[in-house]
Amino acid sequence: MIMEHSETDLVIIGAGPAGLTAAQYAARANLRTLVVEQLAPGGQALNIDVLENYPGNVGVENPDDPEGGRGPKSGFEFSRDLLGQAERFGASFLTDSVLSAAREGNRFSVVPGSGKPIGARAVILASGAKHRLLDIPGEAEFSGRGVSYCATCDGPFFKGKKIFVVGGGDAACEEARYLARLSPHVTIIHRRDRFRAQKALADRVLHNSGVTVRFNTVMREIEGEKKVTRVVLETNGKQTREDADAVFIFAGMVPQSALARSLGAETDEAGYVITDQRMASSVPGLFAAGDVRASPFRQVVVAAGEGALAAHCAAAYIDNLDGGAYPAVFPG
């Protein structure tokens, strides 16, 4: 359902798993709910070929399998189903960017790219985060075909294979250790002469027999045909070409939190929105869920749970504005 709006109860910015789940729960709570998404609904989940680690996603009938085989849904199928659920419960969707937002009194004014302001009583920011890219040849071409940004999502597809990990922070070290449980051929490269990760974590990587560490090394190119087959590395100015089956890139994330900051919401040093356990930010009526929120673990199942909680608490917040039963939960 796609409509034009000028006034609504709740605006959800972003239609990844967090935003789509929030839309379903908000609409079921009888809130007038509008989701604004610049791209296709699904967010980063659309890039997941097989969503095999989502609880309960054990399989769907495969019409192309003559034996009636079953397999987990893809990220696209999963996102399509989330969208359909939200629409059936009455959520509306607008394909547009969000230029700005302001809060006056107990109301928000959200301005989409079309320029027509949308009034809302509460806002859920579910705009996600973008992977910081290496911007090297082959990275974009082989994304989803050997290039990945999530070891727990895609690592099991490369059991026993030759895996390169790029990065030197906590995420890179943690994911390299995880991948070493799947393959004894994991090489982590870092452009500096030491890891940026916490010392205890870095030491565990350095002493892991399944991980080869190369400092002062950068990846210059990723090569292949239908999938990744080689990488070009540069160490101390000398380039080498090596066989590879997968490249996992952990150069950092860039949270899409500019809108929250413009409203005065508190963020951590990396730019992620800080919330309480109810997903409420430091700005009354502004909630955050999913990858834009400060969190120690980012997975589809976590984003969906946070979206549901954000919608429930946004409904409580709105009920409080109307004199409902939640004054102790949302003071002021």
Image: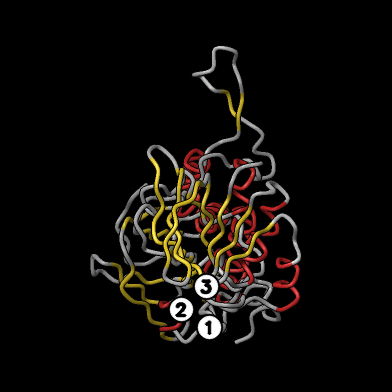
| Real-space CA distance between mark 3 and mark 1, rounded to the nearest whole angstrom | 43 Å
What residue lies at 64% left-to-right and 71% top-to-bottom? Answer: 170
* For discs 2 and 3, the disc positioned in front in the rendered view: 3
Residues marked 3 and 1 touching at CB (< 8 Å): no
Residue 304 image point, x, y percent: 60, 55
Residue highlighted by disc 3: 216
What residue lies at 66% left-to-right and 45% top-to-bottom? Answer: 53
- The residue nearer to you, when weighing 263 against 208, is 208
The vertical placement of 295 against 232, above or below, is: below
Label annotation for residue 283: 1
Q: Residues within 10 Å of mark 2 (few under 14, many from 20)?
A: many
Residues marked 2 and 1 touching at CB (< 8 Å): yes
Residue type pointed to by label 1: Val
What residue lies at 32% left-to-right and 64% top-to-bottom? Answer: 97
Q: Quadrant of residue 59?
A: top right
Q: Residues within 10 Å of mark 3 (few under 14, many from 20)?
A: some
Residue 272 image point, x, y percent: 54, 76
